[in-house]
Image (tube, helix red, strand yellow):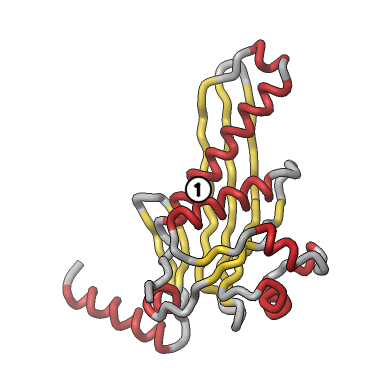
Amino acid sequence: MNTYRLNSLAALAVAALIGGCALAPYENPIEAINYSSDHVALAVKGQYRSIAVLPFKNDSPYETADEFARRTFVAQLTSHKSYDVQRTSHTDARLKDLTRAAIDQKNWQELESAVNADMLVFGHVLEEYHSWGLVYAKTRVRVRIDLIDARTGALLWTSEDTRSRLTGGIDPFAMVLNTQAEYMWTREILNRYDELFRDMMQCLPDRTAK
């Protein structure tokens, strides 16, 4: 790429920021994550300290998918970033008077008042899939994460991606033992969530130390 083209792209990026379009699309080829981020607000200005991870939405047929995903996301966030992450038990207690339908981005003012955090995390399990056979086993998860400025409702960071894996099959004797089979697919599903959110953390700007 020549110098003129680089300068032109840089000028366009600056113009977009000045014009108020601060959320820019990115791709991390190493972690294979597509995401959009307001790096200036998150990493440069350093105006956000606390995060509340709200209960996730669940479009999968498995009733535990949202809780699996939320727990794993919180674990990765607290392990890799220096934000003050509100305990989910505290968040849930503060949301107890709200309906599940009220946990929506359009209600950011009401949610901010309830949880009292700088940023709100909205998670959405779009897919959870597992299939076991004698020859192979397949697991797949797809999740969307949105980080919202709790004071303005502005979208600061968003990513939607998938992690899947094809592994060796299950022991036929284990298939008869439902408890063991359930443990095996649960472990593999949790591994997929763990892989996805660990990769997302590599793309999420950390809080600026002050």
Residue type at tag 1: Leu
User: What residue is disc 1 on?
Assistant: 196
In this rendering, the answer to whether 155 lies above or below 197 is below
Left or right? Give the position of 1 relative to 76.
left
Q: Residue 39: percent from the left, percent from the top?
A: 41, 73
Asked if residue 139 can be seen in this view, the reply is yes
Q: Residue 21: percent from the left, percent from the top?
A: 47, 81
Left or right? Give the position of 200 relative to 85.
left
Q: Residue 167: percent from the left, percent from the top?
A: 51, 26
In this rendering, the answer to whether 167 lies above or below 43 is above
Instruction: Give the quadrant of the C terminus.
Output: bottom left
Within 10 angstroms of label 1, few (less than 14), some, or many (20 or more) residues?
Answer: many
Pick the residue in front: 50 or 106.
50
Residue that extends furthest to the left in the rendered view of this protein: 3
At x 46%, y 80%, the residue is 47
Numbered label tally:
1
Q: Which quadrant of the view contains residue 18? A: bottom left
